[in-house]
Each structure stands twice: as structure tokens, then as C-alpha cells.
Amino acid sequence: MEQELPIIQIRNCLLVSIQTELHDRLALDLQASLMDRVRTVNARGVILDVSGVEIIDSYITRILNDIGKSVRFMGAECYIVGIRPAVAMTLIEMGVELDSVSTALNLDLALEKLELLQ
Amino acid sequence: MKTVEKEIGAILSGTISSITQRSIFNRLGPLATTPVHQLSASDRATIMRELENSVRLFARSNSAQLIASCAKALEPGAAAAVSGAATAVATAAPATLAPKKLPIEQEKDIATARLEAWSEAVRIGLSKFASVKVATAVSELARNIVFYAGKGFVELRSVQDERGLVGLQIVASDDGPGIPQEKLQEIWAGTYKSQRGMGKGLVAVKKLVDDFHLDTRPGVGTTVKCVFKGER
């Protein structure tokens, strides 16, 4: 099943809501199309909404970090929003870092933080 | 022509995330894509049993109402049979469970195993946070199997400790290439970096669980046995 995650543009930010199981192919496609879009629309920020993701393991964390890193290389900032409390606790306990992205409680706050950057 | 997946998906959307819905439908197998009007009475009962468990676990509110809507969507006459099954499940509510062996062969099995582990954890009475930890650990172990061994299985069973508390034992086993000694040292030292993962899956699992046992033999396979202890 070929699928692609829709990328939504809000002013000069790009938003992706992750509502599906991330796997290698999908993650790489997302990373590539995000970088493309960051360049074509001069995006200041990329926001990944993971509020629909109930479990984040080390593999998904690596994917998010990789996307964050590549977005930062382009000069934009990457925000992860909507991490659930239980997911956050689990990541802490596992000793896994989300260090290549910024986080915000929700979409609104991420947009606010990105606006302040301007 | 409406399939089970479409009908039920429409009812659950907004309450249960699409990722979880996907796993629920995966568990239904071919029944998920069967047109509603072609369902037999026993099909309906199977679907409703599965849905009731999942909806009760994952819906944040009014699960009873959702279950009733699902039953109605499948067939008006099904509702009566379902409410009977619901009370039977509610009164039985076993604290222990029969061992469950889940084959892990492809990426979608990871999600299925995760969901299965999550619901078992809730069923034996682990807290919400502990159940998420259980699901995460199973996710890591199942991923290792798919990435490095190709296929294997994850087995879940309830275990009782000396204090009488019920916990969950997870056994992940494969007959893949095994982990060579020097690589194992790198893994525990935190210096190992794999191509696909972060090389941190095993370390993460070890930190999450209460009891951890690794048996790996190059050329023979790998078995990880771990336990989440029951909570007071």
C-alpha cells in the first residue's frame, strides 16, 4: 500500500500530523519531501504532531531525531508536539533522547514559539 | 458496498486513533474487509468480542455507547447478542491469562504485538503508565526480530510473584543470526550503532523491565525473557 503523509502549510511553517505507523520507507519519504518543501516555501519551522501516536519506541525516536537534524541543517526549526505523558515517562526511563528536535505541548504553542523566532 | 472496516472506522474515528484502529482491524484479519451484509452470526460475534475489548481499553470516554453503535452498524439484531457477551466478559474479568504466542514476521506484526501486549497488561491490572511501558518494550523486541532475524515470536504470560501480585512475562525468541560477543559488549556499553535502529533497543528494554534475561548464540538464535512485576 503506497501512502504519503500530507504536509500542510500554515504561513511559513509546515505541519505534519502523524496518524499512521511510521516505517522506514514512509519516514524517508517524509524526510525528503519535508526538506524539499522547507526550501521551496522558505519555511521557518516544521511541526510534527504526534498526539495520535500512542507508543514511541527507540526506532521512532531515531526517525524523529533524523528528521529534526535534517530540518535544522536547512536552517529551520523542528518541533514535536503532542507527546503523551505516558510516552514521555517511558522515553525518560529508557534513556532515549529527543535531542535533535524542540518540543511544545501543542500546535498552538509551537506556532507561538516559532513566531517569536521571527 | 460497506465493509466492516469502513462502518466501524466511521464510528471509532475521533475517539480511537487511526493507528490503533489499524491494529484492531489487523487483528480481525479478512473479516475487516468483508462487506457488512455478508457477515454470518458467528462472524459478527467474533468481531464484537474483539471490538468490545479494544474499545473498552482505548476509548477515553463512553465506551459502552461506542460498542452499542458498532453492534448496530453491523446489524440491528446483533445488539442483543452483544450485550449478553459484554456482561459475560465484565463478570469474568480474569486477573491471569493463558499464555499468548504471537508470530512476528513482518512490520505489521510489530503493531499487532504491541497492541496485544498493551491490552494484556491492562487486563491483568497494570497501571496506565506501566501498560505503555509494556507495549513499548514489546515494540522494541518485536522490531529487533523483524530487523535482525526476519521472523520469530513474542510470548506473553501472566506471572505471580511471592507477594501474590500478578505481573507480565514477555519472551521474545528467534532463530536468527544471534549477537556476537563483541557486539554485545558494544551494545551494553552504549557505543553500538546499527544501520536501521539506534542500537539502543535492548538497552532500552533492559531499563524498562524489572527482570531481564538475554540468551543469544551466534548461528542459533536469540531469546529475551523479561518480566514486568505486578503493582500494588
Image (spheres, coloured by chain):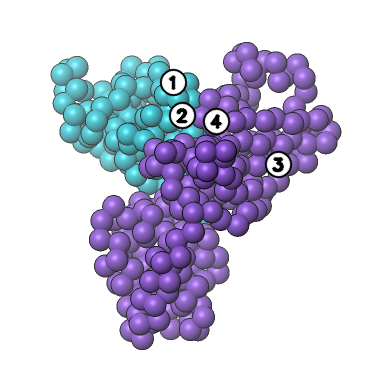
Chain colours: A cyan, B purple
Evaluate whether label 1 is on the same chain as label 3: no
What chain is tagged by disc 1?
A
Dot 3: element: strand
Q: Are marks 2 and 4 in contact (CB under 8 Å)?
A: no
Q: CA distance from mark 2 to mark 4?
A: 23 Å
Dot 2: element: helix
The disc labelled 2 sits on which kind of residue?
Thr
Residue drawn at x 36%, y 76% as measured from the top left: B83
Evaluate whether label 3 is on the same chain as label 2: no
Q: CA distance from mark 4 to mark 1?
A: 21 Å
Evaluate whether label 2 is on the same chain as label 4: no
The disc labelled 1 sits on which kind of residue?
Glu
**Which of the labelled discs sits on residue A97, or is there none?**
1
Q: CA distance from mark 2 to mark 1?
A: 8 Å
Residue drawn at x 64%, y 46% as measured from the top left: B154
Mark 2 Cα-neighbour bin, 10 Å: few <14, some 14–19, many ≥20:
some
What chain is tagged by disc 2?
A
**Which of the labelled discs sits on residue B173, or is there none?**
3
